[in-house]
Image (cartoon, grey):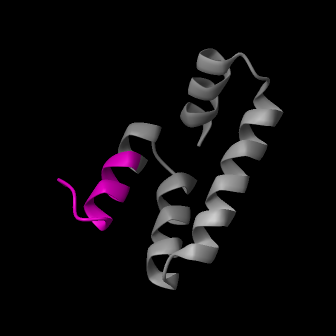
Amino acid sequence: MDELIGQLTSKFGIDAEKAKGTIETVVNFLKTKLPGPIAAQIESALAGGTASEAIAKLGGLLGGKK
């Protein structure tokens, strides 16, 4: 998640706390809209690794390339 925070701070000029809050808000929203197993995978993907790895994992879950 740190890499994702870094990307948000550099692209949008917001501080790290706001970026982290934004990510948490989006993840919490997705967790309420997606089936439990997929929501758990999103949380797992963001817990470790780089943002690129998380996006790749999520793409695989949603039918994209792995």
- Quadrant position of residue 58: bottom left
Determine whether, in the image, residue 53 is placed left or right of residue 10. Answer: left
Residue 6, above or below 35: above
- Quadrant position of residue 14: top right
The part of the chain drawn in magenta is 55-66
The single residue placed furthest to the left in the displayed view is 65
The C terminus is located in which quarter?
bottom left
Residue 22, above or below 47: above
Residue 20, above or below 24: above
Q: Is 25 included in the stretch rendered in magenta?
A: no
- Looking at the image, which residue is at 17% across and 53% down? 65
Residue 50 visible, this angle: no
The N terminus is located in which quarter?
top right
Residue 16, above or below 11: below
- Looking at the image, which residue is at 71% across and 16% down? 13
Q: Residue 22, how many percent across, how many down?
A: 72, 44
Q: Residue 38, how many percent across, how many down?
A: 44, 75
- Looking at the image, which residue is at 58% across and 65% down? 30
Determine whether, in the image, residue 39 is placed left or right of residue 62. Answer: right
- Looking at the image, which residue is at 30% across and 55% down? 59
Determine whether, in the image, residue 6 is placed left or right of residue 37. Answer: right
Residue 42 visible, this angle: yes
